[in-house]
Amino acid sequence: MSQTVDRALSILPLLAEGPADLGQVADRLGVHKSTALRLLRTLNEHGLVYRQSDQRYRLGARLFALAQEAVENLDVREIAHPHLVRLNESCGHTVHLAVYEENEVLYIDKVESRYPVRMYSRIGKPVAITVAAVAKLLLADLPEAERRAVAERLDYPMYTARSTPNAPAFLKELATVREQGWATDLGGHEESINCVAAPVRGADGRVAAAMSVSAPNVVVTAEELLTLLPLVRRTADAISRDFSGRAPTKEDPKE
Amino acid sequence: MSQTVDRALSILPLLAEGPADLGQVADRLGVHKSTALRLLRTLNEHGLVYRQSDQRYRLGARLFALAQEAVENLDVREIAHPHLVRLNESCGHTVHLAVYEENEVLYIDKVESRYPVRMYSRIGKPVAITVAAVAKLLLADLPEAERRAVAERLDYPMYTARSTPNAPAFLKELATVREQGWATDLGGHEESINCVAAPVRGADGRVAAAMSVSAPNVVVTAEELLTLLPLVRRTADAISRDFSGRAPTKEDPKE
DNA sequence: GATCATGTTGCATCATGTGCAACACTCGTT
DNA sequence: AACGAGTGTTGCACATGATGCAACATGATC
């Protein structure tokens, strides 16, 4: 669309791989050094790119700040947070909130387990989309055609023996999830970790987000974790009510 | 420098305030709607901006992913992490790692407290620069002139009665910190929270990062927390050794 | 069904971004 | 010291590509 901006933005993922100097950037963009220089300068002025002491460029601090502000401003997140905390208080395990956006599912909130053995994850980190319970819920709600399309173009890494192996298996699983209105991940991502998840729906009934409770085998067995399902579903429903009750993506409280 | 890119990037902070529609964006940029549209489209293609169901734009998912990758790739962070974990295991409190970059100090790593009462903070979030112990260490090491300049242009919000009130007081504090090689924040940000911090130095002796241990009054008193100082300093020194031993910002292991 | 607000497209104009070539600078080499 | 390789930087002439306009589409409101 806009060539200049397109080039400038292409620099970001490139730098995400690691610091690079002017020449490398110019080469990989396929432009003259002077052009790359001007683009980098502009990015630098906006704080998206930082020039370190050895003159190489890397991603800048403003990027974090922007991502921060963005995540803080998500309506669902704000509404859901207190519920997640309460759920964590009553069961003690790690609680996640995730949304789907253009082929990615990502965690937008997390309340840490109170047990010493924790699960690795981070807000903003893309989720293992083919196995995570929250991902199943979010994808299961997509329109038939899109769901198929997404399923087809995904990779199916075998994190463990229980990982979803391929697109047909995934679609089958999505159908089940869609049917029952909740999802699990029993050791599909990490051998010893299980999750149960439930959907948060907006005013239009579409799944707007998904929340899950995760715990390692060493703390509770899968069966024990499943006994939490009603509680998880109740929490998700409560969030849905709060979320769809007011500001159904439409009007903003302020401005 | 590059007008088009400059305009496009100006959209990001604007959207960080909250979702906006095409008209609003065009107005605030001072350009024609069609121009704003093309810029937004380009941003959208790169995933930095997302178009929500009501047609308004907001910051997109790729932004998080980028910030994630960027933070994962920071050399200091990678090297420091195991040390931070070990420190957390031996004292149980929240451990932070922070760096300075262009007028901002931000947390780049964190190990959560094992106590139920936790401190609010998040990786990527800019730190209260005038009071945080880590900020003092990072700023204290800047060259005289820059330190002065930064101190002058900062705001000095009075979070509590113990917050640093103004530039002269801040510079005085920085001098002390520089002298003694460690820093504290005793209720300067949140009334009930205290921190002790120590610097991580690169091969050139400059402060490359700073780490801190934080705990609320209800868990340990300020005096008790101060007894951890030697341990914190030893940890920071260990990180410094690891960090300056190899890859002192110069050559990259790979490529 | 008329009116308004908003998003979208095609196009002519010329401002802007482009690559080039020359220059500055820092290293490491002899 | 002098040299040369590698890299970052500047000024400039050219034409590409970004711009605003005006016309069209869409959909909400009355």
Image (cartoon, coloured by chain):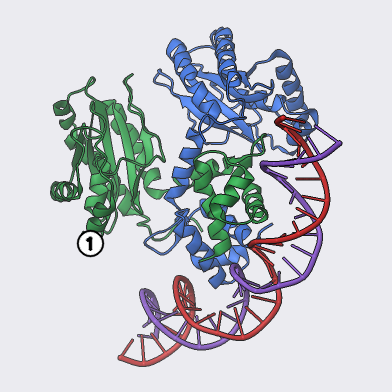
Chain colours: A blue, B green, C purple, D red
Residue A33, quarter of the rendered image:
bottom right
Camera-nearest residue between B89 and A202: A202
Vertical order, B94 against A233 (above or below): below
Residue sitting at x 49%, y 55%: B254
Vertical order, A92 against B22 (above or below): above
Residue sitting at x 24%, y 37%: B158
Camera-nearest residue between D15 and B99: D15
Is residue B236 visible in the rendered image? The answer is: no
Say few, some or many: other residues with alpha carbon within 10 Å of mark 1 (under 14 / 14 to 19 / 20 or more): few
Is residue B61 visible in the rendered image? The answer is: yes
Residue sitting at x 66%, y 49%: B45
From the viewer's perspective, is B195 left or right of B6?
Answer: left
From the viewer's perspective, is A177 left or right of A211?
Answer: right
Q: Position of residue B211 (x, y in %)?
A: 28, 40
Q: Position of residue A150 (x, y in %)?
A: 73, 35
Vertical order, A1 against A137 (above or below): below
Q: Which residue is mark 1?
A: B145
